[in-house]
Amino acid sequence: MSLVLRVGPARAQWWLEHLQSLLPDIECRPWDDPGDPAAVRYAVVWKPPAGGLKRFPNLELIVSIGAGIDHVLADPELPQGIPIIRTTGDELTQRMREYVLMHVLRIHRQLPLVEAAQEKAEWLQIVIPPATGRTVGVMGLGNLGGDAARMLATVGFKVRGWSRSPKLIDGVSPFAGFNALEAFLSECEILVCLLPLTSETRGILNADLFAKLPAGASVINAARGEHLVEDDLLAALDSGHLKSATLDVFYEEPLPSKHPFWAHPKVLVTPHVASMIDPESGGKMIAANIQRFIAGEPIADLVDLEKGY
Ligand code: NDP
Ligand code: OXD
């Protein structure tokens, strides 16, 4: 009985050794050297290539090294009927909370202007409203978005949240479904996207949506690159309707060196690091979920494949 691991090369060995130490009864093998394909029962993967998982005829479980599972569902040859578990956890949530707080405050307190002024040795005093005078909208109120919205409300922001089904979170004005999207957007000065990528949310950050935001709004996308229509964002920034964009995720990762986002004065690029799953904390979550699966116990992170997230 074996487990096959597919993760980027930078941390592959760390992952493999750590998972093996947590799952001593299962042989953990790298993706490119899986041994007997018939022995592979578990696949722990980030962005598996198309057709890669169908190599294993006795696969029982797929584990996403990520909160999102879009990168698994993207495989057109994905073997059907196999349960998929996503990876969550306090550290993942904590890291995303820090990312959202840092970038919302950077925009709210106009840090780019302060830094530009310093370069010119200019003493620029800007009167900024307190957070209680600023509205932030969070799209997606799940583990990450729900937590971020709660945290922003605690800091003092006026917070709105948008989800598929209604969600009640202290200090957060709830909006649910596409019928409520326009009303939700109408006052969001800073918009944070923490949606999963599904057929309903692909391309949701587009010209139509930007037009419904107040003039001068800023957008933070820490969800998936495919949520964003890149040309629409560039047009909205260049027309001045949007003030700035903070992007952690991209259609193509790593973001190609010639991509216009890198040098755009209104875009801050971060390299998909808003909340990284590391082998220590992520490995513990993954190993615990595999053990629950083997024991036939309930698994909170089991993905509802009907919903697609
Ligand atoms: P969850 O599945 O816990 O939550 C998803 C939220 O989005 C839910 O509130 C859900 O609504 C809402 N939603 C889904 N579809 C729609 C829709 N059509 N319309 C409105 N709302 C919708 O996800 P997580 O919070 O764990 O993660 C969100 C995403 O963040 C991941 O899928 C991943 O893409 C991204 N991510 C990015 C990371 C990074 O480092 N940049 C790290 C980790 C995750 P409802 O509550 O009604 O179900
Ligand atoms: C995730 C991610 O989905 O890292 O967890 O993007």
Image: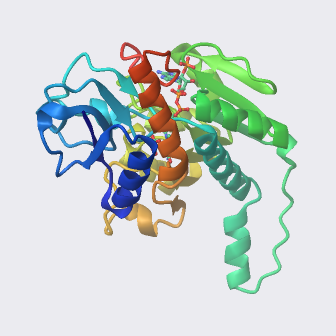
Residue at image location 68% in from the left, 38% down from the top: 148
Residue at image location 68% in from the left, 83% down from the top: 119
Front one among 29 and 27: 27
Which quadrant, please, contains the N terminus?
top left
Above or below: residue 24 compared with residue 159: below
Lateral position of residue 267 relative to residue 156, left or right = left
Lateral position of residue 267 relative to residue 251, left or right = right
* Residue 271 at x, y percent in the picture: 46, 59
Whether residue 186 is visible to the viewer of this picture, yes or no, is no
* Residue 153 at x, y percent in the picture: 80, 35
Which quadrant, please, contains the C terminus?
top left
Whether residue 79 is visible to the viewer of this picture, yes or no, is yes
* Residue 214 at x, y percent in the picture: 65, 39
* Residue 122 at x, y percent in the picture: 78, 82
Q: How many marks?
A: 0
Asked which colour scheme the image uses, the reply is rainbow
Residue at image location 49% in from the left, 25% down from the top: 301
Q: Quadrant of residue 255?
A: bottom left
Residue at image location 63% in from the left, 52% down from the top: 99
Front one among 245 and 168: 168
> What is the residue that sits farthest to the front in this orientation?
25
Lateral position of residue 241 relative to residue 103, left or right = left
Lateral position of residue 98 relative to residue 30, left or right = right
